[in-house]
Amino acid sequence: MFTSDQEITDTLGHFNISDYMDISKRNNIGPKVAEIVNKTVPKIPSIHKVEDEIKLKTNGYITFDNFLSQDEVEKIKNTLIEQEGYNTHVPKYSDQVLRKLTPDYGFNTLSYPPTSLLNMPIILNKIVDPYILSLSQAYLGCFPTLYSLNSWWHIHKEQIYGTQNNHRDHDDFRFLALFIYLTDVDETTGPHVFYPGTQDGSESDKSIVITGKAGTAILADTFAIHRGQPLQQGSRLVCWWRYGLNINAMHYHDGNDNFKSSKENIFSNIPNALHNEYLFRAFY
């Protein structure tokens, strides 16, 4: 265990996911957690553009075209399509029956185990992308912790899945989600809908619809109001991973601690450096 994890508990106590919804606690405890992390894990060099940091902090999100190349997208899709998954967007909440995505698949969602992504060199190298880590560090106030990975299909079934309604995620006192479209997404195939500025807990009726080609990435604070637009046709494949302040309560609540890779597997594909060990420590 890195000393910051124990010190956070010793200094601030244990948190429940309900604590992450409290605006006062978010504003007060988040910086305290970051301060403890900074004493253990030094910040990496800042290499991102200042205007990107301002955009992320102001709007709560930023997009990156061609974050993955088309070749990388195809490799990920071809690997996932051969695997079995679960009938909810997070495996813990499924009926625990593993199924493949076939033409007669009866649900509107299929998600793959987090280990599916942990076993992909393309994904591991993007998780440690220096620009994304630099930008995330600036937003969080400390070097991030990876606490969640996921990949899932939404399929047009004329049903509304829970995450296709407006909601806030309450994963941590401060966190970011990195979504990547693995299929082309237009207004009919389930675009991400985001309400800029609401990451501070405010309300708004002004939203933006984020479409994009396969390989488009969205880095967002999803404590802001957001949803996945219900599909009008076809299907959509997305993956995410999330950067937080530490190994938070949501990591355990969503069952991510049940999906581990080995340290040897992870670091056979990325450098075995202090920051990478810290970043991935919840998954080995």
Image (cartoon, rainbow, N blue to C red):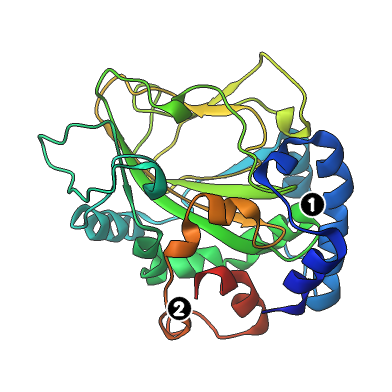
Q: Which residue is mark 1?
A: 50
Name the residue: 22% across, 54% down.
84
Tell which circle, 2 or 1, labels the residue nearer the N-terminal end.
1
Q: Position of residue 149 (x, y in %)?
A: 47, 56
Name the residue: 66% across, 44% down.
17
Q: What's under tag 1, amino acid-wise?
A: Val
In the displayed structure, 50 sits above or below 247; it is above
Q: Position of residue 207 (x, y in %)?
A: 61, 20
Foreground residue, 88 or 15? 15
Q: Is residue 191 left or right of residue 10?
A: left
Q: Which residue is mark 2?
A: 266
Q: Is residue 39 left or right of residue 261?
A: right
SS type, badge 2: helix
Which label sits on residue 204?
Answer: none
In the displayed structure, 119 sits above or below 107; it is below
In the displayed structure, 163 sits above or below 175; it is above
Label 1 crowding class (10 Å Cα cut-off): few <14, some 14-19, many 20+? few
Q: Position of residue 251 (x, y in %)?
A: 56, 56
Q: What's under tag 2, amino acid-wise?
A: Ile
Foreground residue, 172 or 123? 172
Foreground residue, 190 or 115? 115
Task: Tell me the quarter of the picture where residue 224 sits.
Answer: top right
SS type, badge 1: helix
Q: Position of residue 208 (x, y in %)?
A: 58, 23
